[in-house]
Image: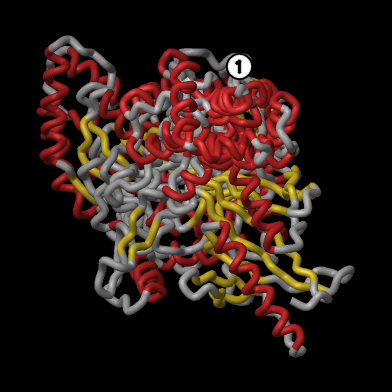
Amino acid sequence: MSTEWEVVIGLEVHVQLNTQSKIFCACPTAFGAEPNTHTCPVCLGLPGALPVLNEAAVDKAIAFGLAINAQLHRQSIFARKNYFYPDLPKGYQISQYEIPIVGKGHLDILLTDGSEKRVGITRAHLEEDAGKSLHEAFVAQSGIDLNRAGTPLLEIVSEPDLRSASEAVAYLKKLHALVRYLDISDGNMQEGSFRCDANVSLRRPGEPFGTRAEIKNLNSFRFLEKAILFEMDRQREILENGGKIVQETRLFDANKGETRSMRSKEEANDYRYFPDPDLLPLHLAEERIDRVRVSLPELPDVRRIRFMEQYGLPAYDAQVLTAHRELADYYEQVAENLDAKIAANWVMVELLGAMNKAGLEIPDFPVPAGELRLLLQRMADSTISGKIAKEIFEILCSEGGTVDAIIDAKGLRQITDERAILALIDEIIANNPKQTAEYRAGKEKLFGFFVGQVMKASHGKANPDQVNSLLKNRLLSQ
Amino acid sequence: MDLHLQDIHSLAEGLRRREFSALELTDTLLARLANRQQELNAFVTVTADLARQQARDADARLARGDHHPLLGIPLAHKDIFCTRGVRTTCASRMLADFVAPYDATVVQRLRQAGMVMLGKLNMDEFAMGSSNETSHFGPVRNPWDLSRVPGGSSGGSAAALAARLLPAATGTDTGGSIRQPAAFCGVTGLKPTYGRVSRYGMVAFASSLDQAGPMARSAADCALLMDAMAGHDPLDSTSHPKAAGNFSAALGRGIAGLRIGVPEEFFGEGLDPEVATAVQAAIQFFAARGARILSVHLPHSVHAVSTYYVLAPAEASSNLSRFDGVRFGHRSEQRSDLMELYCQSRYEGFGPEVRRRILIGSYVLSAGYYDAYYRKAQQVRALIREDFRRAFAEVDVILGPTTPTPAFALGDKSTDPVSMYLADIYTIAVNLAGIPALSLPCGFTAQGLPIGMQLMGDYFADELLLAVGDAYQRETPWHQQSPKEFGL
């Protein structure tokens, strides 16, 4: 990308709220059921059926608004967005238009150079999801599954404050971590619980915003990055060849790694928004906002700073460990009353490495925090060495079990009995008269040879500190 | 026994005294209905077997000593209320074969009270019309004069009541659809305060205006029906938490001291002199019994019709979007692609008046026109509401004609939508304000056509309106008249 172009990005993120039931009826929101089994007259849009707002969805929206320091509108309005689509049962989507529940707020992201950037959030509004069209299983027809119709969504719209693909990814990751912290969404991107549209345009720095394209259907961080990079190249090429960007909606094709036009502005729907007469204006009482505020968990930024202060961790460690609520919870369980830095290293290196390798998240990972904590304790109390600890951790990951049972079953307990170690040392010295003589003559490099021999003879179980000091004494005491 | 001539109160008394059973009553009415249906066309669907079953259930309850005042009383529902297992057509080709898997709250409440459903009543298609001529199942005829319309949209309800086919019916009123046909057919109908009767399961026309209400021979019967119909419904967000009431218990009050407002705007140009005379006589009736007659002004009511014909079609255009041929309702055979499926299904499924209103509604909501039409109409609506608020600071009820003319002839206005819309000139402001209004008979023209008057009240004055109407009906004969061929 030539330096004279600046990319301007704003994201619209659809977050599926993890309520038990749908936003306007009592049907369950669970994913993966038989098509059209989680439906009722309301979410099927049957004649005469009426929506009733799920208050739990409202509380989750309030929690989000508080977490981004947003203005919460004490009165917001549900509106109908009218358009025809086979998986939109009523012919309109109930959304919020002129007055959303969450107004202006912001989110701070950490850039790769370590600096912070404040990203403005324009608004967040409640709305219902549509159903799904299924094209694969039918010949010359499409199936409609309305299980998802009426699932509560929070659409979070950012300001056009992002200036690179990596900033956009950092923002999206931060948002993802935040909704999981708040427990307002499971954030499952594969199931579509967290998906993103990106508005991308180019301009000369300092000039007004250029014409943008909206890229739909970005359901992973990688796709977001690839789509923006592709779009930047596409737009630059058009602009540098004297062309004009057409305002349009583009779809990201994950297989080809490119975006392609869906519809232009001229073809866009006139949604004929108007206030939904079936729903009263949504009023937020101060007591309700206070109740949600009190129930908020510790938020990522606050937790990161606490990790640095309470555990004495470097900024980088605190950042990595607090990026996800589950990871931070895991770490805190491991680190309790142990060396915080050692615990941090284990979690960041061994645990994250193993999770990555297995492609698992914390809730599915086979080693519970309590077991890792016990492992580090056994290391601290010299039951096992660090090397053995890593071996045990691998066994825990691959076979499960408990730390103490593995230590006993495999005879991995560290040898700390002085007499036993001395017996090994004496044997090694007796078997290696030549090296002993050379060492005693001043060839101190050979000390490592002796340590290695003793450790080998103990099958790695002799306490290395004890081996060091006892060996030194024995070799010198002649 | 002329069971068909008796009102709910006397039928309930007869059932209680075991003078006849609910099944006998139901069979009597079903037999009459079978004879009269062809000339009136008041019913879309007659549910004889179901009615007999419900009547037997009611008899069993009566035998156990259950004496709910509506137990065993037959009624029929306007075909806009969803009924589980019985088709709900909205008098439209679109829903000609639609069978809802659930009951509307109104249907459920009246069934729980023990009422026996005889069938589903004809209406204007999707409640859009003032003459019952837009029905896919053909027009309903006015029993007082078969060449005339019964009014609309609840025309089947009013005609069936007037012809003494049944003692009770449900209706819905978006711009006058209970009151105008009640006036044209000489029966009594209440449009309750918005939010007192659940809209759940009532096919929506204009959600902010639609309100279900009772239609019967008298205000006292309407009160009995309201006792069962009204009440908060958690399934309807616009249902009022204090919707319930004891309407029957409010009856029996005197008229002395009642402040009755008479709006000048309702007695101007376009009002038929015979209607004016009858309504003036009613005013004299109240004055003679100690009511204070006061002049009130509703200056913005002249804009009610134009305001309504922006807002109601706007909401309708959206409410009727769900009829797309995809999941239920009419699906065209011509459907080579999705757009054709939509366009053909809707074109074939909806009649011309419904299509006209969808077009108007889509237009007033579209980008660039919203502010000029929809938003402006909402502002006028607020002014109309304010007119009533000011008036009800001075008076207890407002009295005026329900309609400018008595029932007009079939075909008279069906080719001129605007003149048809003006048939609702006195009823529409009430819906825009959300207040209750009762229409009741107050005389006849020289030709023998019924004339109706309208009592309007402040929010939650439904009980007062019924009590005033009941006081009037205790001393007047109008509501007891029935058309000759049908009354016998």
- Residue at left offset 50%, top offset 29%: A385
Look at the numbered disc 1 and give the secondary structure of its residue: loop
- Residue at left offset 57%, top offset 24%: A474
Foreground of the two, B294 or B12: B12
Quarter of the N terminus of chain B within the rendering: top left
Disc 1 crowd, CA 10 A, few/some/many (<14, 14-19, 20+): some
Q: Is residue A138 left or right of residue B415?
A: left
Foreground of the two, B301 or A430: A430
Q: Tell me the quarter of the picture where residue B484 sits.
A: top left
**How many labels sit on residues?**
1
Point out residue A340 in the picture as x, y percentages from the top left corner.
Answer: 64, 27
**Residue A44 appears anywhere in the view:** yes
Q: Residue furthest bottom?
A: A241
Reply above or below: B487 against A385.
Answer: below
Quarter of the C terminus of chain B within the rendering: top left
Q: Residue furthest right?
A: A206
Tell me the residue that label 1 is attached to: B290
Point out residue A441 in the picture as x, y percentages from the top left corner.
Answer: 65, 37
- Residue at left offset 80%, top offset 49%: A115
Tell me which amino acid carries mark 1. Gly
Reply above or below: B381 against B6.
Answer: below
**Residue B209 appears anywhere in the view:** no
- Residue at left offset 21%, top offset 13%: B66
